Amino acid sequence: MQTANQYVPKKSQLVLLTLLVLFSPLAIDIYLPALPMISSTFHVEHALAQDTITWFLFAMGVGQLFAGPLADKLGRRTVALGGVSIYAVSALLAWSAQSIEWMLVSRLLQGLGACATSVAAFATVRDIFGPQKSGKMISYLNGAICFIPALAPILGSWLTQQFGWRSNFSFMAGFAVVVLVFLWVGLKETNPQLSKEPVFKLNRYLDVVKTPSFVFHASLCMLAMAVILGYVTSAPVVLMENLGLSMNEFTFWFGINAAINIVACMSAPKFMDKFGTHWALTVGIVTLALAGMVMLSLATQATPLAFMLPIFMSSIGFAWILGAAAGKALAPFGDKAGTAAALLGLFQMSGSGLVVGTVQRLGMEPQVMIATLMLIVTPALMILWSKSGKTWHHATA
């Protein structure tokens, strides 16, 4: 019987968990305004500069298959400290990159470090808050994550203009070192009964994947994340290159969307408390579908608002889906929370990257591509409102 759920978290512990989940969005959002400069520095197509994001996400997703079992075997604290250390070293490697290949390898390594911090954070949430309350806490953590897209591009734009694009990566390294010190002093282990199974055992993954509620809710997280990934990789091209916005103007629109996402992430737990996760997912999916239709209807309008209005809508749908679906995906698992969190991360990161990469290769315009990503989640409503779908959400009510 796991006893970690009786652990009473201190405020400092919750602050540390928040810091742990910031590494991934920071590694993506801070240098978005500098993407055109990176492609210019290395004399490569803009698509290769965008690959520094997709390679990072791919490594973050696949790496969680290793970080998850290690979090169950060695403890959440050990994996968190290791992940932050790798993150710091890889950020320095990216800072010193002399070729796009060097940069891509550095970003792969950084994705591995970020995945470890993410797995450790969400597994700790499951340890502390248990299966029924973890979804609410995950929503609050996602709200904290959303502050990064609001603030990081502003910081990244300033750093890039004052010190060059490489300063974004030196900032990441410095941030990691500071957090590493805080974690070493303050982070406590929340899973005292560590797994005695081998670190890499196929059955651990199969037991999770065989759970229908996990597959469904992890797939929802994947499809919702694909919308955000499609937006993030396309926004610099649409807004800065096609529409001619400056770096500061791009940051302005990006920040507005992040602020909307923050409000959505903070409102989702309150809605779930009152109406339940089933209705939260329903509203989130419908909002994404409406956003897709608005994006298609405005695709020919060459203005920032025409592009960003459906993005604003999709950010609300994304936040509500991710908060409810992530908690439900992890709910059935106790001592395997690390493995389940790893597989959830694989769905979200590598899975969403695969979905976006596939859709991008269909040769669509960016607006049509993003609208497609928004609409493909709609059939999930049929499963959600089926007898099994209702049971997953009402069984613990």
Image (cartoon, grey):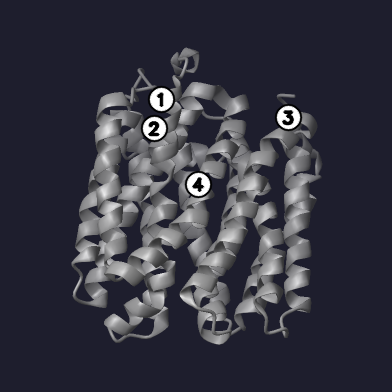
- 280 displayed left or right of 15: right
Q: Position of residue 340 (x, y in %)?
A: 48, 38
For disc 3, the marked residue is 273
The residues bearing labels 3 and 2 have C-alpha atoms spaced at a distance of 25 Å
Residue at the front extreme of this rendering = 162
- Circle nearer the N terminus (4, 2): 2
Residue 12 bears which disc, if any? 1
Q: Earlier in the sequence, mark 3 or mark 4?
A: 4
Q: How far apart, in angstroms, are the residues tagged by discs 3 and 1? A: 25 Å
Percent of width and height locating residue 131: 58, 26
Tell me the element at label 3.
helix
Q: Amino acid at mark 4?
A: Ile
Q: Is residue 348 left or right of residue 375?
A: left
What amino acid is found at the position of numbered circle 2 in the picture?
Leu
The crowd level at tag 2 (other Cα within 10 Å; few <14, some 14-19, many 20+) is: some
Between circles 3 and 1, the one closer to the viewer is 1
Q: Secondary structure at mark 4?
A: helix
- In the displayed structure, 59 sits above or below 281; it is below
Looking at the rendered structure, the secondary structure element under dot 1 is helix
**Would you name the residue on which mark 4 appears?**
145
From mark 4 to mark 2, how far is it between C-alphas? 13 Å
Q: Are marks 2 and 1 in contact (CB under 8 Å)?
A: yes
Comes first in the chain, label 4 or label 1: 1
Residue at the spot of label 2: 16
User: Residue type at mark 1?
Assistant: Ser
Q: CA distance from mark 4 to mark 1?
A: 17 Å
